[in-house]
Image (cartoon, rainbow, N blue to C red):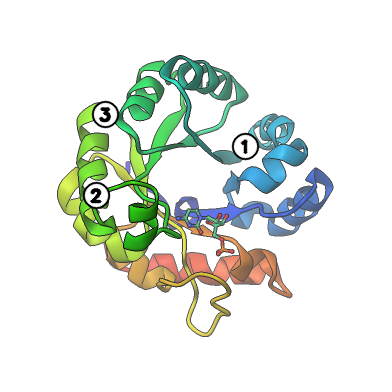
């Protein structure tokens, strides 16, 4: 069944307490069905909040970017699966992706981060890699597909290229979304909601343009309307 426009918006709960998250979620109401919890909230009580959100019918993306020895990754994935979360990120190393894919249970889907978007070729060289970003993104996307990962986190600018590698089976989840005229902040490569959907994104991750808006619900509704405006 194709995704409804509303279900393709994932709002990043980048706040420092569950109390703040609850206020936001209440304000957004039925406009938003999917939330992302990353380091900031996860390590401030957000892991326990997953069950609350899931209990009220919301979906949760835990952006924990796991990377450890295979056994530890597998056990972590099993615990996350019990939380009711729908998506979990792991770093795109083959051993880590394989351990996570094998351990996933229930409704949990594993997303791989190919290369962190804050890395450029010089950063990879400093970390000991021979390959540049473009080459490594392609290699890791192909590995993710071969291992049976469920989706890839990438910038919308990479979506067309990655879709060509992973085919239609994997979900493409893209942050760095900015409605026309919105503040770009520290993001470097941004796309509007409509152009990201047109480029092949399945899910848009949006933080500040919604959570820092004077009227978060109106900002979210405008993005849902923009998603709906793109012909599939
Ligand atoms: O506020 P903004 O819309 O920039 O938030 C984007 C969210 O997506 C943040 O939670 C950020 O950590 C996350 N993210 C990102 N770029 C990535 C992976 C995740 O911006 N490559």
Q: Are marks 3 and 2 in contact (CB under 8 Å)?
A: no
Distance CA(mark 1)–CA(mark 3):
27 Å
Circle 2 is placed at which residue position? 130
Q: Are marks 1 and 3 in contact (CB under 8 Å)?
A: no
Horizontal side, residue 58 vs residue 197: left or right: right
Q: Quadrant of the C terminus?
A: bottom left
Residue 112 image offset from top left, x and y in percent: 38, 40
Which numbered disc flags the more N-terminal residue, 3 or 2? 2
Distance CA(mark 2)–CA(mark 1):
45 Å
Question: Which residue is at a point 42% across and 31% down the rendered structure image?
Answer: 109
Answer whether residue 199 is visible to the viewer in this image.
Answer: yes
Helix, strand or loop at disc 3? loop
Residue 110 image offset from top left, x and y in percent: 41, 33
Q: Which mark is residue 215?
A: none
Q: Quadrant of the N terminus?
A: top left
The vertical placement of 179 against 227, above or below, is below
Question: Which residue is at a point 67% across and 54% down the rendered structure image?
Answer: 14
Helix, strand or loop at disc 1? loop
Other-residue count near label 1 (Cα within 10 Å), few / some / many at <14 / 14–19 / ≥20: few
Q: Which mark is residue 148?
A: 3
Q: Nearer the viewer, mark 2 or mark 1?
A: 2
Q: Are marks 2 and 1 in contact (CB under 8 Å)?
A: no
Answer whether residue 168 is visible to the viewer in this image.
Answer: no
Q: Which residue is the extreme one toward the right? A: 19
Question: Which residue is at a point 61% across and 57% down the rendered structure image?
Answer: 31
Distance CA(mark 3)–CA(mark 2):
26 Å
Q: Which mark is residue 57?
A: 1
**Count of numbered badges drawn on the protein:** 3
Which numbered disc flags the more N-terminal residue, 2 or 1? 1
Residue 162 image offset from top left, x and y in percent: 23, 53
State which quadrant residue 182 falls in: bottom right
The vertical placement of 8 against 221, above or below, is above
């Amino acid at each position: 069944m194709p995704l409804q426009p509303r279900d393709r918006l994932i709002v990043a709960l980048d706040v420092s307490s569950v109390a703040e998250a609850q206020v936001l979620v209440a304000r957004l109401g039925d406009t938003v069905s999917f939330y992302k919890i990353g380091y900031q909230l996860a390590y401030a009580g957000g892991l326990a909040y997953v069950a609350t959100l899931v209990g009220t019918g919301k979906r949760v993306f835990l952006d924990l970017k796991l990377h450890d020895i295979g056994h530890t990754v597998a056990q972590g994935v099993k615990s996350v699966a019990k939380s009711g979360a729908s998506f979990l990120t792991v770093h795109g190393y083959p051993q880590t992706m394989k351990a996570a894919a094998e351990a996933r249970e229930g409704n949990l889907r594993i997303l791989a981060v190919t290369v962190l978007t804050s890395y450029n070729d010089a950063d990879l060289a400093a970390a000991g890699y021979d390959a540049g970003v473009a080459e490594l993104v392609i290699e890791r996307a192909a590995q993710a597909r071969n291992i049976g990962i469920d989706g890839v986190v990438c910038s919308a600018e990479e979506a067309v290229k990655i879709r060509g590698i992973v085919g239609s089976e994997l979900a493409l989840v893209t942050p760095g979304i900015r409605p026309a005229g919105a503040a770009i902040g520290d993001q470097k490569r941004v796309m509007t909601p409509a152009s990201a959907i047109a480029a092949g994104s399945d899910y848009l991750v949006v933080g500040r343009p919604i959570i820092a808006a004077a009227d978060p619900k109106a900002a979210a509704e405008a993005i849902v309307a923009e998603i709906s405006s793109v012909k599939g």
